[in-house]
Image (cartoon, rainbow, N blue to C red):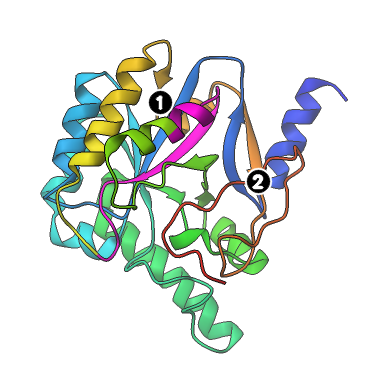
């Protein structure tokens, strides 16, 4: 199959899948941050990124964005992309109401309320909380004009640990086209994240050969790779067409 046909076929898979990386030979990767914004932690992460000329994508919670529009604007003003992570981090599978019609309305409301809170700086990139999804929820998001972005691997930065384990985990898995999920806040806690800032500095200092791009900028450098994890457990997954499946990233890993 010609390469253009392969690219077209892979893009078609996105209707029911989530982007988990980009097929590219260029030394590029995308840092993504979930669960913010948080006044106690997000500005420090922005400073680390700025020091190294790195751009990132922030998947924000609508409730937090509504309470600090100035911080949302600052993230955008520094050249980062802002995406949707739901209103309050409820699982769109586990916490959805009973009844098919009610579930559809509730999931749409989680996205649209967040987009409203983000205002003109928000994009329609969408990452469901915990990575929970069903076939229906992925298709709904697509029909609502949202592109679901998952991840290649996570830094497990929600664990209370020194910087080295997080930095080592990222460095061990880093490859061109990776989408890395970290957290500028935790959905159930908003406070300083010095260990993450230190880990981020280690990775950026050691890998100056990489260009750290926003998700949209990296998508322009290759062909998107899709994953198809479904269910309310981040461990419930099926491999995508290229035999890559995104890893669990969050501290809710129970079935």
The residue carrying mark 2 is 245
Residue 209: % across, % down: 42, 10
Q: How far apart are marks 1 and 2 (CA)?
A: 21 Å
Can the viewer see residue 10 in this picture? Answer: yes
Residue at the image position 25 percent from the left and 27 percent from the top: 49
Q: How crowded is mark 2: few (under 14 residues within 10 Å), some or many (20 or more)?
A: many
Of helix, strand and loop, which one carries label 2?
loop
The residue carrying mark 1 is 213
Query: Magenta stretch containing residue 32, yes or no?
Result: no
* Magenta-colored span: 169-188
Residue 237: % across, % down: 67, 57
**Quadrant of the image occupied by residue 211:** top left
Can the viewer see residue 76 in this picture? Answer: no
Decide if residue 138 is on the left or right side of residue 78.
right
> Residues at badges 1 and 2 in contact (C-beta under 8 Å)?
no
Query: Magenta stretch containing residue 187, yes or no?
Result: yes
Of helix, strand and loop, which one carries label 1?
loop
């Amino acid at each position: 199959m010609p390469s253009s046909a392969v690219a077209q076929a892979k893009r078609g898979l996105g209707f029911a899948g989530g982007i988990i990386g980009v097929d590219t030979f260029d030394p590029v990767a995308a840092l993504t941050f979930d669960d913010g914004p948080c006044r106690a932690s997000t500005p420090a992460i922005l400073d680390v990124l700025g020091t190294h000329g790195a751009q990132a994508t922030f998947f924000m919670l609508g409730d937090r964005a509504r309470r600090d529009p100035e911080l949302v604007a600052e993230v955008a003003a520094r050249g980062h992309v802002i995406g949707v992570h739901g209103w309050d981090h409820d699982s769109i599978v586990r916490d959805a109401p009973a009844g098919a019609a009610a579930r559809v309305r509730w999931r749409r409301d989680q996205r649209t309320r967040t987009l409203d809170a983000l205002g003109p700086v928000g994009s329609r990139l969408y990452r469901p909380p915990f990575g929970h999804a069903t076939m229906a929820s992925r298709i709904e998001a697509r029909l609502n004009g949202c592109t679901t972005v998952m991840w290649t691997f996570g830094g497990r930065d929600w664990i209370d640990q020194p910087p080295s384990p997080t930095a080592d985990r990222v460095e061990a898995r880093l490859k061109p086209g990776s989408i890395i999920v970290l957290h500028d806040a935790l959905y159930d806690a908003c406070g300083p994240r010095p260990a993450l800032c230190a880990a981020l500095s280690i990775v950026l200092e050691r890998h100056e050969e990489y260009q750290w791009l926003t998700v949209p900028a990296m998508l322009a450098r290759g062909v998107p790779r899709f994953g198809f994890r479904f269910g309310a457990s981040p461990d419930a997954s099926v491999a995508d067409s290229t035999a890559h499946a995104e890893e669990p990233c969050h501290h809710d890993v129970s079935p």
